[in-house]
């Protein structure tokens, strides 16, 4: 039988009642990122759903990790929450937490975000894609799959880079196109080879600028995108807009 100790190391901190409390491996000054992200996600969801409506919808948490946000959605009253993650060890922790907290309205599966499609679990009024986009090799594909399973709202949280804009030749010297919004290629090979659980499924990551994120979401099929304001006392990266949370509507 799994225990908190047998499942260590933990990334998130959970209070699982009589079974104890997990301890995150994150430094104390980084740990508040989780609370800020959750508060911003909750604020985003309030833009699309009343508390009464939440009890009628299904939520898909893509890249659910240990189920921190899945558990929060389940406790908030969402009728059914499904979490998927590429790593089996993370799913084991998520299932442990859900069982310990008696969250019978949750289930968890091992799945790469790029392989997601409606034939697997159906569609969902609400989907989450938190802290994942800037770790994936194919961000546009992931956003298209997210859109395909979302019927009303997706909430996305990601690291972002500074904006870059200008013009580029487009087939000939005299033909040019303007560009704004960029993707940065990030090589996570060192962390990936060291079996760091916070990397993506491959060592190559892509991080968008805010304008790139908005454009990609709209091309993925979302009609409207709104950035969520950080709350008072937010984690420093959210306060400085180096990480953003956005709500995207179908």
Image (cartoon, helix red, strand yellow):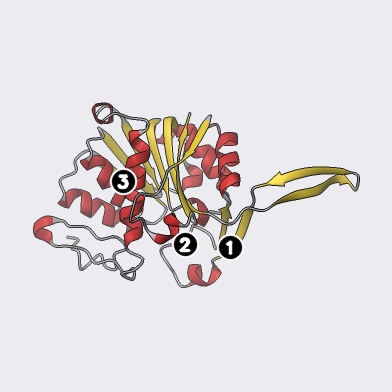
- Give the number of the mark in front: 2 or 1: 1
Question: In the rendered image, is residue 35 in sight?
Answer: yes
- Please give left or right for residue 74 compared with residue 181 in the image: left
- Please give left or right for residue 220 compared with residue 83 in the image: right
Question: In the rendered image, is residue 109 in sight?
Answer: no
Q: How far apart are marks 3 and 1 (CA)?
A: 29 Å
Where disc 3 sits, the SS reads: strand
Residue 96 lies, in percent from the top left, at 22, 54
Q: Residues within 10 Å of mark 1 (few under 14, many from 20)?
A: some
Q: Residues within 10 Å of mark 2 (few under 14, many from 20)?
A: many
User: Residue at left 8%, top 58%?
Assistant: 18
Residue 129 lies, in percent from the top left, at 43, 45
**Furthest residue toward front:** 232
- Give the number of the mark in front: 3 or 1: 1
Q: Earlier in the sequence, mark 3 or mark 2?
A: 3
Question: Would you name the residue on which mark 3 appears?
Answer: 108
Residue 66 lies, in percent from the top left, at 31, 55
Question: Would you name the residue on which mark 2 appears?
Answer: 199
Q: Distance between the residues labelled 3 and 2?
A: 20 Å
């Amino acid at each position: 039988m799994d225990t908190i100790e047998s499942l260590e190391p933990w990334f998130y901190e959970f209070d699982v009642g009589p079974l104890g409390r997990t301890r995150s491996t994150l430094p104390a000054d980084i740990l508040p990122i989780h609370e800020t992200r959750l508060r911003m996600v909750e604020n985003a969801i309030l833009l699309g759903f009343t508390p009464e409506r939440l009890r009628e919808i299904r939520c898909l948490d893509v890249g659910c990790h240990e189920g921190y946000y899945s558990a929060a959605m389940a406790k908030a009253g969402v009728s059914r929450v499904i979490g998927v993650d590429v790593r089996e060890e993370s799913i084991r922790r998520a299932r442990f937490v859900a069982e310990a907290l008696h969250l019978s309205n949750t289930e968890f599966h091992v799945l790469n975000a790029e392989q997601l499609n409606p034939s697997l679990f159906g569609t969902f009024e609400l989907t989450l894609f938190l802290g994942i986009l800037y770790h994936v090799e194919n961000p546009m594909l992931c956003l298209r799959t997210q859109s395909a399973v979302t019927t009303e709202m997706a909430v996305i949280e990601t690291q972002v880079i500074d904006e870059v804009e200008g013009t580029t030749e487009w087939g000939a010297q005299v033909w040019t196109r303007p560009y704004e919004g960029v993707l940065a290629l990030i090589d996570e090979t060192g962390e990936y080879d060291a079996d760091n659980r916070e990397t993506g499924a491959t060592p190559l990551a892509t991080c968008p600028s805010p304008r790139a994120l908005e454009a990609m979401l709209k091309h993925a099929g979302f009609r409207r995108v709104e950035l969520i304001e950080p709350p008072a006392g937010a984690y420093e990266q959210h306060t400085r807009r180096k990480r953003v949370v956005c709500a995207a509507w179908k």
